[in-house]
């Protein structure tokens, strides 16, 4: 099996690279399986504090599913493709460590869905984001519609999904699809500053904050107040000399 995913540890950051640049890092079963393995490795390695996901080359983060492979699948295999893609992206979304998608070039279709599963999406000025599935006659199949609605609201999510327009980096920033633009792309010192900040956050504190921020039913009353009390007690114990 060829290496469709490259892993390189830089200090406490695990850099995961989608490695299929000649096909704009489109994702087939092999890449999804190797991506799943990389995320499992990151979850289990206490030396990994942050996961950075990027695409090989500057042309694309990922243009999504490998359509040639997808069209060759039987109905049963296509069902497995959808289910497995969901499980991989859910694993990324639920990882108790910060995840950052560094987008250079195109993040289209399933590539955008992968970026949406990450905690943070940052981009180079050349980045272009799009959800193009409807113009091909199908729907985003790896959770992208739900994540888009949660991230930017129903109205704008409808624009992204139903209009299938290519969204340049500056517009994506204004919409809230990405949080920052780094002028020098993956080599920008701003990216290093972000990663350094994230590696400095206590892992358990990050896990608790992510759990709260991801809970759509979170309130400011009852058991949720008790959670805050217990979290603060734990923090005070860690800070005691």
Image (tube, grey):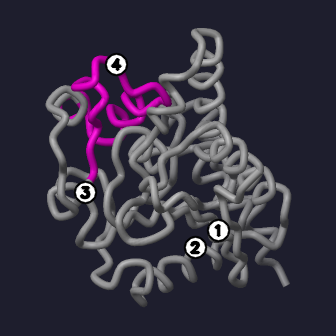
The mark found on residue 128 in the picture is 3
Q: Quadrant of residue 19?
A: bottom right
Q: Which residues are magenta?
A: 129-157
Residue 135 covered by magenta stretch = yes
Residue closest to the eye, 7 or 91: 7
The answer to whether 71 appears left or right of 95 in the picture is left
The residue pinned by badge 2 equals: 198
- First in sequence, mark 1 or 3: give its number: 1
Q: How far from the left and from the top, in percent, is residue 9?
A: 72, 77
Q: Which residue is mark 1?
A: 50
- Mark 3 falls on what kind of element? strand
- Specify which label sits upstream in the sequence, 1 or 4: 1
- Calculate the distance from the C-alpha at mark 1 to the C-alpha at mark 3: 24 Å
Q: Are marks 4 and 2 in contact (CB under 8 Å)?
A: no
Of the numbered discs 4 and 2, the one sitting upstream in the chain is 4
Picture coordinates of residue 145, whole percent (x, y): 37, 28
Mark 2 and mark 1: span between their CA atoms? 7 Å
- For residue 138, the mark is 4
Q: Residue at x 71, y 52 (%)?
A: 39
51 drawn magenta:
no
| 1 and 3 marks in contact (CB < 8 Å) | no
Is 64 in front, or is 216?
64
Determine the image quadrant of residue 172: bottom left
Q: x, y (%) of residue 96?
A: 69, 53
Residue at image point 27% right, 34% down: 132
Local secondary structure at mark 4: loop
């Amino acid at each position: 099996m060829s290496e469709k995913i490259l892993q390189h540890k830089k200090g406490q950051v695990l850099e995961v690279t989608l490695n299929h640049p000649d096909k704009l890092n489109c994702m087939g079963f092999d890449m999804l399986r190797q991506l799943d393995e990389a995320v499992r490795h990151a979850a289990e390695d206490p030396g990994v504090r942050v996961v950075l996901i990027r695409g090989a080359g500057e042309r694309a983060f990922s243009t999504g599913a490998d359509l040639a492979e997808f069209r060759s699948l039987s109905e049963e295999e296509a069902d497995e493709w959808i289910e497995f893609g969901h499980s991989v992206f859910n694993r990324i979304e639920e990882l108790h460590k910060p995840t950052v998608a560094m987008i250079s070039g195109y993040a289209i279709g399933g590539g955008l869905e992968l970026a949406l599963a990450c905690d943070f999406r940052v981009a180079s000025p050349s980045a272009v984001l799009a959800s193009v599935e409807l113009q091909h006659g199908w729907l985003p199949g790896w959770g992208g519609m739900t994540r888009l609605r949660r991230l930017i609201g129903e109205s704008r999510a409808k624009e992204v999904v139903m209009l299938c327009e290519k969204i340049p980096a500056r517009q994506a920033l204004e919409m809230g699809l990405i949080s920052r633009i780094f002028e020098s792309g993956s080599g920008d010192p701003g990216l290093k500053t972000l990663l350094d900040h994230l590696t400095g956050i206590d892992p358990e504190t990050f896990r608790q904050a992510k759990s709260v921020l991801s809970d759509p039913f979170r309130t400011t009353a009852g058991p949720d107040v008790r959670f805050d009390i217990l979290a603060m007690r734990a923090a005070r114990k860690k800070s005691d000399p």
